[in-house]
Amino acid sequence: MKKVIYLLAFATIFSCKDEVKQTEITETETPKTIMQTNLDKYVSVKLTADLSVLSKKEMQMLPILISAANKMNDLFWYESYGDCDALLDAVTDEDTKKYVKINYGPWDRLDNNKPFVDGIGEKAKGANFYPKDMTKEEFEKASMENKTSIYNFVRRDGDGNLFTIPYHKQFEAEVKEVSRLLLQAAELAEDKGLKNYLELRAAAVLNDDYQKSDFAWMDMKTNTLDIVIGPIETYEDQLFGNKAAHEGYVLIKDQEWSAKLAKFSSFLPELQKGLPIDVKYKKEKPGTDSDLNAYDVVFYAGDCNSGSKTIAINLPNDEEVQLKKGTRRLQLKNAMRAKFDKILMPISSVLIEESQRKHITFDAFFANTMFHEVAHGLGIKNTINGNGTVRTSLKEHASALEEGKADILGLYMVQQLHKKGELKEDLKDNMVTFMAGIFRSVRFGASSAHGKANMIRFNFFQQMGAFTRNEDGTYKVNFQKMESAMEMLSKVILTYQGDGDYDGVAKFVENYGSIPEQLQKDLDRLSDASIPVDVVFEQGVEALGLN
C-alpha cells in the first residue's frame, strides 16, 4: 500500500482544560499497521495563499487572527471529549496519538465514531455538552435556565440536579484572550466593516450574544481578510442537534473569483418560487443581501478541523439573520482544489464508468459545492404548523436533513440556471460530478451530517433508477431519471422540514441512512487503491512563511 505522508503540522496548542477525571488508558492491542492504515485515510495538504494581495497592516493582522482562531482548538476539545491532556498523556503509541489529534478524541469520525483506544467506550451522543448519564427524557422534564440555548453546557450539581453553565463562564479565561486578540486585530483593520465586526465579535465571545456580530459580518462587503470564529455549528451534538461547537477559520478573499459569483444570489427569490413543492412550503422569502464569494483558507481550528474538513461555509445559522439579511456563502477554493485533485479524481477512475469520466470537472465540482451553500437559503426555516423552527423540531436529525436539502436543491439550482442560460457548461458535468461526490462524501460515515445525507441520497437515487451499477463495478448516471429523482427527493425533504415531522424524518433516516453491502464493498475498493478519504493540513504562520 502506498503510504501517505501524515504530516500533522497542526499550528495547535493542546493545553486542554477540563473537570473530567483522568482514567488510565491504553492503546488497543492491534498491529501498528492498522493505525497506519487509519492515518492513510488522510492526505496532507499545505494551506497557502497569495499574500501579495494583503496590505502591510493586513499582513500584521494575519498572525493575530490565526492566534485567535487557534484558541478554538482547546474549547472544541472540551466539547468533543473533555480532558485532552489526560488522554494524550496516556496514549504512548505515536501513530495512535496522531490519530487522536486528527479526531479530537479517541473516536474515529470516519468510522461512525468507533473507539480506537482501550479504556474508552462509545462516544456519548451529546458529546461533552451534557452529563454522560443524562437521558433525553430527563432533559426534557428538567427545569433549567436557558436550557435550550445553543451556547451553554448542561451539568449536574452536588444533589444530582441538572443546571446550565454558559460558554462564556465555562471558558472565561480563554474567551478573554480571544476577545483581546480580536480587538488587537481590529486596531489594525483598515476596512470599516471588518473593524466593526471584529469589535462586535470580541464583545460577543464574552457574553454569548452573537446576533449583532452576525449582522455586522453580513454587512461586510469590501474586506480581503476574514475570520469565522466562535460556537457555530451543532453537528457535534447528536443527542439534540442543539449545542454549538467552537471553531475558527482564517480566510483571504479571492476578489477576482468572487466578482464572477456575485450575481447568483440575486436569483434566490425566483428560484424559491419555482421549487417543486406546494406553495405553503416556500412561503418564506429568502434574503437577497447574501454574498457569494471565493476564498483561500489559511487556517482551520476546532470543529471544522475535526475528521472530514469543510470546503464551503454558509453562515450565519441564526434564522432571524437569515430571513432579514440572507447568508454569506464562502467557497474555500484552495481546500476544494486539494480534495478534487487528491480524492475525487482518483475515486472517479475506480467507480465512474469510463465513458462518463470526461464529465468529472473542477468547474462542476466548484459549482455543485457553491450552489449547495446557496441552496441553504431556499426552502423554509420555520415550520408551517407552529412547531417552531425546522432545526428545533427535527432535533438531532435536522443537520443531516438540511445538508441533504442543500445538496439536492443545489443541483436543482444548477439545472434551473442552465435553463435560463446563466450557466454555459454541460449539465451532464454537474450530474456525473455530483454522483462522484456522493462516493466521496459517504465515506465520511454516519457520524457526519454530510456523510449521512449522502447515504440517504445514494439509496434514494438507487431506488429511483438514477444510476446503474455495471458488471465491472463502475456506476453510470441515467440523466433523465436523475432529474426525476432530484425533484422527488426535494419534495420529500421540504415536506418533512415544513411539517417539522420528527417521527417521519426518524423513520426516513432509518430506512435510507445506511450503507448497502454492495456499496460498502465498492468503497473498500477505494481504500484498497490507497485513495484517501480526506485531508489534514500543514497550516499556520510557518506554512505561510510568516514566522
Image: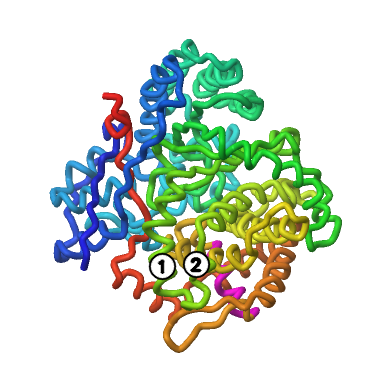
Q: Amino acid at mark 1?
A: Ile
Tell me if 348 is positioned left or right of 509 in this view.
left
Is residue 458 part of the magenta span, yes or no?
yes
CA neighbours of label 1 inside 10 A, class few (<14), some (14 to 19), many (20+) = many
In percent of width and height, residue 500 lies at 72, 56
Mark 2 in CB contact with mark 1 (< 8 angstroms): yes
Bounds of the magenta span? 453-464
Residue at 46% in and 80% down? 474
Circle nearer the N terminus (2, 1): 1
Which residue position holds label 1? 347
Vertical arrangement, residue 426 with respect to residue 369, above or below: below
Instruction: Considering the whole magenta stretch, tell me its main secondary structure.
Output: helix
Task: Give the labeled residue for mark 2.
Answer: 436
Q: Which is more toward the observer, 518 or 268? A: 268
Q: Is residue 122 visible?
A: yes
Tell me which amino acid carries mark 2. Ala
In front: 15, or 363? 363
